[in-house]
Amino acid sequence: MNRRWIVVSALILIGGILLARYTIQWKRQKDSDAIKKTLLAQRNAGTPDEIVTPDKIVEMHIINHFGEFHLERNEFGKWIITKPTSAKADPQILDSFPKVLVGMRIDPVNRKPKNLEPYGLDEPDIKVKYRIRLKNKDFWQQIYFGRRSPVQGSYYALDPDKGDVMLIPFELKFLFNLRLVDLRDKSIVTLPHLKITRLVLRFPDKTYEFIRDRKTNEWWVEKPVAGLADSGKIGAVLSKMNRQEKIAFPEISGDDKETGFDSPALILSLYDPNAVEKTITIGAKAKRKGKETLRYAKIENEDGIFLLDGAFWLDEVSKAMKTPLWERAYFRFRGRMRSIHCEKDGVGFTMSRSGKKPKWKVVGMENRTPEFLKFRNELKIIFNMPQQGYVGATATEAADRFGLDKPKAFIHIHYVEKVRVKEQKLFFGKTDPSGKYVYTYSNLNPYIRLVDKKALDLIPTNPEKFFLDETQGQ
Protein backbone atom coordinates (compact mmCIF):
# COMPACT_ATOMS: atom_id res chain seq x y z
CA MET A 1 0.00 0.00 0.00
CA ASN A 2 1.51 3.38 -0.97
CA ARG A 3 2.07 6.30 1.39
CA ARG A 4 -0.86 8.31 0.07
CA TRP A 5 -3.45 5.65 0.78
CA ILE A 6 -2.07 5.06 4.27
CA VAL A 7 -2.36 8.79 4.98
CA VAL A 8 -5.83 9.07 3.44
CA SER A 9 -7.15 6.01 5.27
CA ALA A 10 -5.80 7.24 8.60
CA LEU A 11 -7.23 10.73 8.10
CA ILE A 12 -10.65 9.48 7.10
CA LEU A 13 -10.83 7.06 10.03
CA ILE A 14 -9.62 9.53 12.66
CA GLY A 15 -11.57 12.45 11.23
CA GLY A 16 -14.74 10.39 11.05
CA ILE A 17 -14.44 9.24 14.64
CA LEU A 18 -13.72 12.74 15.95
CA LEU A 19 -16.49 14.33 13.92
CA ALA A 20 -19.04 11.69 14.94
CA ARG A 21 -18.13 12.13 18.59
CA TYR A 22 -18.27 15.90 18.18
CA THR A 23 -21.68 15.89 16.47
CA ILE A 24 -23.26 13.60 19.03
CA GLN A 25 -21.90 15.61 21.92
CA TRP A 26 -23.00 18.89 20.36
CA LYS A 27 -26.56 17.63 19.96
CA ARG A 28 -26.65 16.44 23.55
CA GLN A 29 -25.22 19.69 24.95
CA LYS A 30 -26.60 22.17 22.46
CA ASP A 31 -27.83 24.55 25.16
CA SER A 32 -24.73 24.50 27.39
CA ASP A 33 -21.16 25.75 27.26
CA ALA A 34 -19.61 22.35 27.97
CA ILE A 35 -18.88 21.67 24.31
CA LYS A 36 -16.97 24.96 24.02
CA LYS A 37 -14.60 23.88 26.76
CA THR A 38 -13.72 20.52 25.26
CA LEU A 39 -13.31 21.25 21.55
CA LEU A 40 -10.48 23.52 20.54
CA ALA A 41 -12.01 25.18 17.48
CA GLN A 42 -15.37 25.70 19.11
CA ARG A 43 -13.90 27.08 22.33
CA ASN A 44 -11.89 29.81 20.62
CA ALA A 45 -14.08 30.75 17.66
CA GLY A 46 -17.58 29.36 17.98
CA THR A 47 -20.64 30.75 19.69
CA PRO A 48 -23.56 28.97 21.34
CA ASP A 49 -25.61 29.74 18.24
CA GLU A 50 -23.11 28.68 15.59
CA ILE A 51 -21.23 25.42 15.55
CA VAL A 52 -17.77 25.22 13.93
CA THR A 53 -18.06 22.57 11.23
CA PRO A 54 -15.35 21.36 8.81
CA ASP A 55 -16.71 23.39 5.91
CA LYS A 56 -16.21 26.60 7.92
CA ILE A 57 -12.42 26.13 7.86
CA VAL A 58 -11.41 28.03 4.72
CA GLU A 59 -7.63 28.39 5.03
CA MET A 60 -4.76 26.48 6.65
CA HIS A 61 -1.06 27.20 7.18
CA ILE A 62 1.13 24.23 8.08
CA ILE A 63 4.78 24.43 9.14
CA ASN A 64 6.50 21.06 9.55
CA HIS A 65 9.79 19.26 8.95
CA PHE A 66 9.36 19.56 5.18
CA GLY A 67 8.58 23.27 4.91
CA GLU A 68 5.77 25.80 5.09
CA PHE A 69 2.54 25.18 3.21
CA HIS A 70 -0.44 27.48 2.70
CA LEU A 71 -3.75 26.04 1.60
CA GLU A 72 -7.13 27.65 1.01
CA ARG A 73 -10.51 26.96 -0.52
CA ASN A 74 -11.21 28.49 -3.92
CA GLU A 75 -14.53 29.97 -5.02
CA PHE A 76 -15.88 26.46 -5.60
CA GLY A 77 -14.95 25.26 -2.13
CA LYS A 78 -12.04 23.14 -3.45
CA TRP A 79 -8.69 23.14 -1.68
CA ILE A 80 -5.69 24.62 -3.47
CA ILE A 81 -2.05 25.08 -2.49
CA THR A 82 -0.86 28.69 -2.58
CA LYS A 83 2.60 28.28 -1.02
CA PRO A 84 5.33 27.25 -1.85
CA THR A 85 3.69 26.71 -5.25
CA SER A 86 0.31 27.18 -6.84
CA ALA A 87 -1.40 23.85 -7.42
CA LYS A 88 -4.53 21.82 -6.83
CA ALA A 89 -4.54 20.01 -3.48
CA ASP A 90 -5.40 16.38 -2.87
CA PRO A 91 -9.13 16.55 -2.06
CA GLN A 92 -9.22 13.42 0.11
CA ILE A 93 -6.36 14.50 2.35
CA LEU A 94 -7.35 18.18 2.56
CA ASP A 95 -11.02 17.48 3.21
CA SER A 96 -9.96 15.28 6.12
CA PHE A 97 -7.83 17.95 7.84
CA PRO A 98 -10.78 20.16 8.86
CA LYS A 99 -12.62 17.13 10.25
CA VAL A 100 -9.64 16.37 12.46
CA LEU A 101 -9.25 20.00 13.54
CA VAL A 102 -12.87 20.63 14.50
CA GLY A 103 -13.08 17.32 16.32
CA MET A 104 -9.86 17.77 18.29
CA ARG A 105 -10.62 17.58 22.02
CA ILE A 106 -8.76 19.54 24.65
CA ASP A 107 -7.25 17.52 27.48
CA PRO A 108 -5.33 20.22 29.43
CA VAL A 109 -2.28 19.15 31.43
CA ASN A 110 -0.99 22.60 32.33
CA ARG A 111 -2.76 25.90 31.96
CA LYS A 112 -0.50 28.71 30.78
CA PRO A 113 2.85 27.27 31.88
CA LYS A 114 5.73 29.73 31.99
CA ASN A 115 8.24 27.23 30.62
CA LEU A 116 7.30 25.37 27.43
CA GLU A 117 10.65 23.59 26.99
CA PRO A 118 9.71 20.42 28.95
CA TYR A 119 6.89 19.89 26.49
CA GLY A 120 8.98 20.50 23.38
CA LEU A 121 6.79 23.52 22.65
CA ASP A 122 9.40 26.25 22.95
CA GLU A 123 10.38 25.28 19.41
CA PRO A 124 7.39 23.26 18.14
CA ASP A 125 7.98 20.54 15.52
CA ILE A 126 4.74 21.31 13.72
CA LYS A 127 2.53 24.40 13.66
CA VAL A 128 -0.96 24.50 12.24
CA LYS A 129 -2.90 27.73 11.82
CA TYR A 130 -6.37 27.75 10.29
CA ARG A 131 -9.01 30.34 9.52
CA ILE A 132 -12.63 29.72 10.53
CA ARG A 133 -15.32 31.67 8.68
CA LEU A 134 -18.48 32.29 10.67
CA LYS A 135 -21.46 34.46 9.82
CA ASN A 136 -20.15 37.76 11.09
CA LYS A 137 -16.42 37.30 11.45
CA ASP A 138 -13.34 35.26 10.55
CA PHE A 139 -11.25 33.73 13.35
CA TRP A 140 -7.72 32.36 13.22
CA GLN A 141 -7.11 29.27 15.36
CA GLN A 142 -3.70 27.67 16.05
CA ILE A 143 -2.25 24.50 17.47
CA TYR A 144 1.42 23.65 17.98
CA PHE A 145 2.76 20.11 18.33
CA GLY A 146 5.58 19.21 20.72
CA ARG A 147 7.31 16.11 22.06
CA ARG A 148 5.87 12.81 23.15
CA SER A 149 4.43 12.68 26.65
CA PRO A 150 5.01 9.92 29.24
CA VAL A 151 1.36 9.06 28.79
CA GLN A 152 1.30 6.26 26.26
CA GLY A 153 0.04 7.17 22.82
CA SER A 154 -0.05 10.94 23.41
CA TYR A 155 1.86 14.05 22.40
CA TYR A 156 1.97 17.50 23.94
CA ALA A 157 0.29 20.31 22.03
CA LEU A 158 -0.15 24.00 22.68
CA ASP A 159 -3.13 26.24 22.18
CA PRO A 160 -1.13 29.48 21.72
CA ASP A 161 -4.28 31.62 21.84
CA LYS A 162 -4.99 30.50 25.42
CA GLY A 163 -1.49 29.40 26.39
CA ASP A 164 -2.69 25.96 27.50
CA VAL A 165 -0.65 22.77 27.07
CA MET A 166 -2.76 19.74 26.31
CA LEU A 167 -2.48 16.12 25.25
CA ILE A 168 -3.47 14.88 21.82
CA PRO A 169 -3.54 11.35 20.36
CA PHE A 170 -0.23 10.12 18.94
CA GLU A 171 -1.43 9.89 15.34
CA LEU A 172 -2.76 13.46 15.09
CA LYS A 173 0.66 15.05 15.13
CA PHE A 174 2.02 13.09 12.21
CA LEU A 175 -1.03 13.59 10.04
CA PHE A 176 0.19 17.15 9.54
CA ASN A 177 3.80 16.15 8.90
CA LEU A 178 3.33 15.74 5.15
CA ARG A 179 5.48 16.68 2.19
CA LEU A 180 4.40 18.94 -0.64
CA VAL A 181 3.99 15.94 -2.93
CA ASP A 182 1.62 14.37 -0.36
CA LEU A 183 -0.55 17.49 -0.32
CA ARG A 184 -0.77 17.88 -4.09
CA ASP A 185 -3.61 16.48 -6.15
CA LYS A 186 -2.13 13.50 -7.98
CA SER A 187 -5.21 12.43 -9.90
CA ILE A 188 -4.95 12.34 -13.68
CA VAL A 189 -8.37 11.21 -14.90
CA THR A 190 -11.00 12.44 -12.42
CA LEU A 191 -14.07 11.72 -14.52
CA PRO A 192 -15.58 8.32 -13.58
CA HIS A 193 -15.05 5.91 -16.47
CA LEU A 194 -18.78 5.20 -16.70
CA LYS A 195 -19.38 8.87 -17.54
CA ILE A 196 -16.82 9.09 -20.33
CA THR A 197 -18.65 9.25 -23.64
CA ARG A 198 -15.81 9.74 -26.10
CA LEU A 199 -12.17 8.68 -26.18
CA VAL A 200 -9.56 9.85 -28.70
CA LEU A 201 -5.98 8.55 -28.73
CA ARG A 202 -3.48 10.14 -31.09
CA PHE A 203 -0.34 8.07 -31.50
CA PRO A 204 2.41 9.23 -33.89
CA ASP A 205 1.35 6.65 -36.49
CA LYS A 206 -2.42 6.43 -36.04
CA THR A 207 -5.48 7.93 -34.36
CA TYR A 208 -8.10 5.84 -32.58
CA GLU A 209 -11.50 7.22 -31.69
CA PHE A 210 -14.24 5.54 -29.68
CA ILE A 211 -17.75 6.76 -28.85
CA ARG A 212 -20.10 5.33 -26.24
CA ASP A 213 -23.77 4.98 -27.12
CA ARG A 214 -25.41 6.62 -24.10
CA LYS A 215 -28.63 4.66 -24.60
CA THR A 216 -27.12 1.18 -24.75
CA ASN A 217 -23.75 1.97 -23.04
CA GLU A 218 -21.99 0.16 -25.89
CA TRP A 219 -18.70 1.45 -27.25
CA TRP A 220 -18.25 1.93 -30.99
CA VAL A 221 -15.09 2.46 -33.00
CA GLU A 222 -15.16 5.63 -35.13
CA LYS A 223 -11.54 5.64 -36.30
CA PRO A 224 -9.61 4.21 -38.04
CA VAL A 225 -12.65 2.24 -39.27
CA ALA A 226 -16.16 2.20 -37.83
CA GLY A 227 -17.45 -0.85 -36.01
CA LEU A 228 -18.75 -2.26 -32.73
CA ALA A 229 -16.06 -2.15 -30.04
CA ASP A 230 -15.24 -4.51 -27.20
CA SER A 231 -17.00 -2.51 -24.46
CA GLY A 232 -15.62 -4.69 -21.69
CA LYS A 233 -12.01 -4.12 -22.72
CA ILE A 234 -12.47 -0.36 -23.15
CA GLY A 235 -14.21 -0.15 -19.78
CA ALA A 236 -11.31 -2.02 -18.16
CA VAL A 237 -8.74 0.36 -19.68
CA LEU A 238 -10.71 3.45 -18.59
CA SER A 239 -11.22 2.06 -15.10
CA LYS A 240 -7.48 1.52 -14.76
CA MET A 241 -6.85 5.07 -16.02
CA ASN A 242 -8.97 6.35 -13.11
CA ARG A 243 -6.59 4.66 -10.67
CA GLN A 244 -3.40 6.08 -12.17
CA GLU A 245 -1.67 8.94 -10.34
CA LYS A 246 0.94 11.58 -10.96
CA ILE A 247 4.16 10.14 -9.59
CA ALA A 248 6.32 13.26 -9.26
CA PHE A 249 6.41 16.97 -10.07
CA PRO A 250 9.83 17.76 -11.56
CA GLU A 251 11.27 21.24 -11.52
CA ILE A 252 11.75 21.69 -15.23
CA SER A 253 11.61 24.64 -17.60
CA GLY A 254 8.99 23.08 -19.80
CA ASP A 255 11.18 23.10 -22.91
CA ASP A 256 9.26 21.06 -25.48
CA LYS A 257 12.38 19.33 -26.75
CA GLU A 258 13.44 18.16 -23.31
CA THR A 259 9.95 17.02 -22.32
CA GLY A 260 9.11 15.61 -25.74
CA PHE A 261 5.95 17.68 -26.05
CA ASP A 262 7.04 18.84 -29.52
CA SER A 263 6.57 15.26 -30.76
CA PRO A 264 4.40 13.53 -28.13
CA ALA A 265 4.22 9.78 -27.80
CA LEU A 266 0.47 10.04 -27.11
CA ILE A 267 -2.21 12.71 -26.90
CA LEU A 268 -5.23 11.37 -25.06
CA SER A 269 -8.56 13.23 -25.03
CA LEU A 270 -11.53 12.26 -22.86
CA TYR A 271 -15.03 13.76 -23.10
CA ASP A 272 -17.91 13.79 -20.64
CA PRO A 273 -21.66 13.85 -21.47
CA ASN A 274 -21.47 17.65 -21.90
CA ALA A 275 -18.61 17.30 -24.40
CA VAL A 276 -16.18 18.86 -21.93
CA GLU A 277 -12.71 17.78 -23.00
CA LYS A 278 -9.72 16.72 -20.91
CA THR A 279 -6.52 16.29 -22.89
CA ILE A 280 -3.37 14.64 -21.56
CA THR A 281 -0.13 14.97 -23.52
CA ILE A 282 2.56 12.37 -22.85
CA GLY A 283 6.08 13.17 -23.97
CA ALA A 284 9.60 11.82 -23.59
CA LYS A 285 11.08 9.48 -21.02
CA ALA A 286 12.38 11.18 -17.90
CA LYS A 287 16.06 10.56 -17.20
CA ARG A 288 15.78 9.03 -13.75
CA LYS A 289 18.01 6.19 -12.68
CA GLY A 290 16.08 3.05 -11.83
CA LYS A 291 12.81 4.54 -13.11
CA GLU A 292 13.12 4.12 -16.85
CA THR A 293 9.35 3.93 -17.46
CA LEU A 294 8.55 7.44 -16.17
CA ARG A 295 7.49 9.99 -18.79
CA TYR A 296 6.80 13.71 -18.82
CA ALA A 297 3.14 14.67 -19.12
CA LYS A 298 0.86 17.68 -18.89
CA ILE A 299 -2.88 18.31 -18.85
CA GLU A 300 -4.33 20.99 -21.07
CA ASN A 301 -5.53 24.10 -19.21
CA GLU A 302 -3.81 22.96 -16.01
CA ASP A 303 -0.53 24.29 -14.67
CA GLY A 304 2.53 22.16 -14.20
CA ILE A 305 4.42 19.25 -15.68
CA PHE A 306 4.37 15.89 -13.94
CA LEU A 307 5.69 12.36 -14.35
CA LEU A 308 3.49 9.35 -14.93
CA ASP A 309 3.93 5.64 -15.48
CA GLY A 310 4.77 5.21 -19.15
CA ALA A 311 4.53 1.43 -18.79
CA PHE A 312 0.78 1.82 -18.41
CA TRP A 313 -0.05 4.90 -20.44
CA LEU A 314 2.03 3.90 -23.45
CA ASP A 315 2.88 0.22 -23.37
CA GLU A 316 -0.36 -1.14 -21.92
CA VAL A 317 -2.79 1.35 -23.49
CA SER A 318 -0.98 1.28 -26.82
CA LYS A 319 -1.03 -2.51 -26.91
CA ALA A 320 -4.73 -2.56 -26.05
CA MET A 321 -5.57 -0.05 -28.79
CA LYS A 322 -3.31 -1.47 -31.46
CA THR A 323 -4.60 -4.98 -30.80
CA PRO A 324 -7.97 -3.98 -32.23
CA LEU A 325 -10.60 -3.35 -29.60
CA TRP A 326 -13.42 -4.57 -31.75
CA GLU A 327 -15.93 -7.00 -30.30
CA ARG A 328 -14.13 -10.24 -29.45
CA ALA A 329 -17.23 -12.37 -29.86
CA TYR A 330 -17.51 -11.36 -33.48
CA PHE A 331 -21.29 -11.50 -33.63
CA ARG A 332 -24.08 -11.42 -31.07
CA PHE A 333 -27.79 -11.07 -30.63
CA ARG A 334 -29.14 -7.55 -30.27
CA GLY A 335 -32.56 -6.11 -29.47
CA ARG A 336 -35.76 -8.11 -30.09
CA MET A 337 -35.16 -10.45 -32.99
CA ARG A 338 -37.80 -10.74 -35.70
CA SER A 339 -36.18 -13.07 -38.20
CA ILE A 340 -33.04 -15.18 -38.70
CA HIS A 341 -31.90 -16.58 -42.02
CA CYS A 342 -29.10 -19.16 -42.24
CA GLU A 343 -27.63 -20.30 -45.54
CA LYS A 344 -24.63 -22.35 -46.69
CA ASP A 345 -23.76 -23.46 -50.22
CA GLY A 346 -27.11 -22.16 -51.43
CA VAL A 347 -29.15 -24.21 -48.92
CA GLY A 348 -30.87 -22.66 -45.92
CA PHE A 349 -34.03 -21.57 -44.15
CA THR A 350 -35.61 -18.59 -42.34
CA MET A 351 -37.16 -18.57 -38.91
CA SER A 352 -39.36 -15.54 -38.08
CA ARG A 353 -42.12 -14.23 -35.88
CA SER A 354 -44.74 -11.49 -36.18
CA GLY A 355 -48.14 -10.37 -34.86
CA LYS A 356 -49.38 -9.31 -31.41
CA LYS A 357 -48.43 -12.61 -29.77
CA PRO A 358 -45.61 -13.70 -32.01
CA LYS A 359 -44.40 -17.28 -32.09
CA TRP A 360 -41.38 -18.45 -33.98
CA LYS A 361 -42.12 -20.32 -37.21
CA VAL A 362 -40.04 -21.61 -40.10
CA VAL A 363 -41.04 -19.77 -43.27
CA GLY A 364 -42.86 -22.21 -45.57
CA MET A 365 -43.47 -24.67 -42.71
CA GLU A 366 -45.82 -22.62 -40.53
CA ASN A 367 -47.92 -25.64 -39.53
CA ARG A 368 -45.07 -26.95 -37.37
CA THR A 369 -43.58 -25.51 -34.17
CA PRO A 370 -39.79 -25.08 -33.99
CA GLU A 371 -37.81 -25.18 -30.76
CA PHE A 372 -36.39 -21.67 -31.04
CA LEU A 373 -34.18 -21.83 -27.94
CA LYS A 374 -32.35 -24.84 -29.33
CA PHE A 375 -31.84 -22.97 -32.60
CA ARG A 376 -30.61 -19.84 -30.84
CA ASN A 377 -28.22 -21.79 -28.62
CA GLU A 378 -26.59 -23.41 -31.65
CA LEU A 379 -26.07 -19.98 -33.17
CA LYS A 380 -24.61 -18.67 -29.90
CA ILE A 381 -21.92 -21.35 -30.07
CA ILE A 382 -20.91 -19.90 -33.43
CA PHE A 383 -21.17 -16.26 -32.37
CA ASN A 384 -19.12 -16.74 -29.20
CA MET A 385 -16.17 -18.36 -30.90
CA PRO A 386 -13.18 -16.07 -30.31
CA GLN A 387 -11.50 -14.30 -33.17
CA GLN A 388 -8.20 -15.86 -34.16
CA GLY A 389 -6.82 -12.78 -35.85
CA TYR A 390 -7.34 -9.83 -38.17
CA VAL A 391 -6.33 -9.71 -41.80
CA GLY A 392 -5.69 -5.97 -41.65
CA ALA A 393 -8.10 -5.10 -44.43
CA THR A 394 -11.82 -4.39 -44.68
CA ALA A 395 -14.32 -6.28 -46.75
CA THR A 396 -14.67 -3.22 -49.00
CA GLU A 397 -10.95 -3.33 -49.75
CA ALA A 398 -10.36 -7.06 -50.17
CA ALA A 399 -13.60 -9.07 -50.26
CA ASP A 400 -12.65 -10.90 -53.48
CA ARG A 401 -9.26 -12.02 -52.11
CA PHE A 402 -10.88 -13.86 -49.22
CA GLY A 403 -14.01 -15.19 -50.91
CA LEU A 404 -16.31 -12.66 -49.27
CA ASP A 405 -17.56 -11.11 -52.50
CA LYS A 406 -19.40 -14.39 -53.05
CA PRO A 407 -19.65 -15.79 -49.52
CA LYS A 408 -19.85 -19.52 -48.95
CA ALA A 409 -22.29 -18.98 -46.08
CA PHE A 410 -24.06 -16.19 -44.23
CA ILE A 411 -26.40 -15.47 -41.32
CA HIS A 412 -28.82 -12.57 -41.60
CA ILE A 413 -30.80 -11.25 -38.59
CA HIS A 414 -33.51 -8.59 -38.41
CA TYR A 415 -34.15 -7.15 -34.95
CA VAL A 416 -36.06 -4.25 -33.37
CA GLU A 417 -34.18 -1.69 -31.28
CA LYS A 418 -35.85 1.51 -30.07
CA VAL A 419 -38.83 0.87 -32.41
CA ARG A 420 -36.55 0.75 -35.46
CA VAL A 421 -35.90 -2.44 -37.42
CA LYS A 422 -32.18 -3.06 -37.87
CA GLU A 423 -29.98 -5.69 -39.49
CA GLN A 424 -27.02 -7.84 -38.57
CA LYS A 425 -25.17 -9.73 -41.26
CA LEU A 426 -22.35 -12.22 -40.89
CA PHE A 427 -20.53 -13.58 -43.93
CA PHE A 428 -18.14 -16.54 -44.32
CA GLY A 429 -15.62 -16.78 -47.16
CA LYS A 430 -12.67 -19.03 -47.99
CA THR A 431 -10.68 -21.10 -45.53
CA ASP A 432 -7.15 -19.86 -44.88
CA PRO A 433 -4.04 -21.69 -46.21
CA SER A 434 -3.74 -23.74 -43.00
CA GLY A 435 -7.26 -25.09 -43.44
CA LYS A 436 -7.99 -24.39 -39.74
CA TYR A 437 -9.73 -21.03 -40.05
CA VAL A 438 -12.30 -19.30 -42.21
CA TYR A 439 -12.35 -15.64 -43.27
CA THR A 440 -15.38 -13.72 -42.03
CA TYR A 441 -16.75 -10.23 -41.46
CA SER A 442 -19.95 -8.58 -40.27
CA ASN A 443 -21.68 -5.28 -40.92
CA LEU A 444 -20.91 -4.33 -37.29
CA ASN A 445 -17.18 -4.73 -37.87
CA PRO A 446 -15.93 -4.31 -41.44
CA TYR A 447 -12.49 -5.77 -40.72
CA ILE A 448 -11.93 -9.25 -42.13
CA ARG A 449 -11.18 -11.70 -39.36
CA LEU A 450 -10.27 -15.33 -38.87
CA VAL A 451 -12.41 -17.72 -36.81
CA ASP A 452 -12.26 -21.44 -36.28
CA LYS A 453 -13.51 -23.37 -39.34
CA LYS A 454 -15.91 -25.19 -36.99
CA ALA A 455 -18.09 -22.06 -37.13
CA LEU A 456 -18.74 -22.71 -40.81
CA ASP A 457 -19.46 -26.38 -40.18
CA LEU A 458 -21.96 -25.54 -37.40
CA ILE A 459 -24.18 -23.24 -39.48
CA PRO A 460 -27.59 -25.00 -39.62
CA THR A 461 -29.16 -25.39 -43.06
CA ASN A 462 -31.93 -27.92 -42.31
CA PRO A 463 -34.72 -26.90 -39.88
CA GLU A 464 -35.95 -30.45 -39.27
CA LYS A 465 -33.92 -31.00 -36.09
CA PHE A 466 -35.50 -27.96 -34.46
CA PHE A 467 -39.14 -29.04 -34.63
CA LEU A 468 -40.77 -29.87 -31.31
CA ASP A 469 -43.15 -32.49 -32.73
CA GLU A 470 -40.28 -34.55 -34.14
CA THR A 471 -38.25 -34.27 -30.93
CA GLN A 472 -41.20 -35.49 -28.89
CA GLY A 473 -41.83 -38.38 -31.27
CA GLN A 474 -38.35 -39.88 -30.84
Image: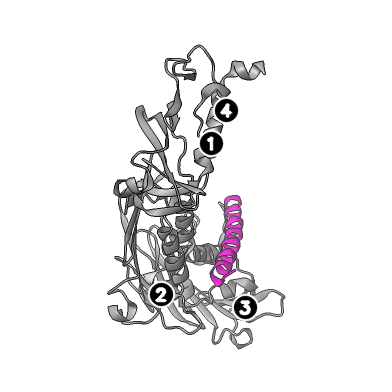
Confirm whether residue 230 shows in the render: no
Which secondary structure class fits the magenta region best? helix
Which label sits on residue 376?
Answer: none
On the image, the x and y values in percent for residue 4 come to 53, 69
Residue positioned 64% across, 87% down in the render: 118
Q: Residue at x 56, y 65 (%)?
A: 11
Q: Which residue is mark 2?
A: 295
Residue type pointed to by label 4: Lys
Which residue position holds label 4? 374
Label 1, residues with CA under 10 Å away: few <14, some 14-19, many ≥20? few
Q: CA distance from mark 4 to mark 1?
A: 13 Å
Q: Earlier in the sequence, mark 4 or mark 3?
A: 3
Point out the frontmost of discs 2 and 1: 1
Image quadrant in which you'd find residue 72: bottom left
Compared to 301, does 275 lie above or below?
above
Name the residue that disc number 3 marks: 156
Q: Give the extent of the magenta segment.
A: 1-29
The disc at residue 458 is 1
Q: Secondary structure at mark 2?
A: strand
Real-space Cα separation, disc 2 to disc 4, in angstroms:
54 Å
Q: Earlier in the sequence, mark 2 or mark 1?
A: 2
How far is the residue under mark 2 from the one under mark 3?
Answer: 44 Å
In primary-sequence order, the first of circles 2 and 3 is 3
Q: Are marks 4 and 1 in contact (CB under 8 Å)?
A: no
Residue drawn at point x = 54 percent, y = 20 percent = 370
Please state which of residues 56 and 329 is positioned toward the viewer in this rendering: 329
Q: Nearer the viewer, residue 346 or 233?
A: 346
Total marks placed: 4
Name the kind of residue labelled 2 in the image.
Arg
Label pair 1/3, CB-CB below 8 angstroms: no
What amino acid is found at the position of numbered circle 1 in the picture?
A: Leu
Of badges 1 and 3, the one in the foreground is: 1
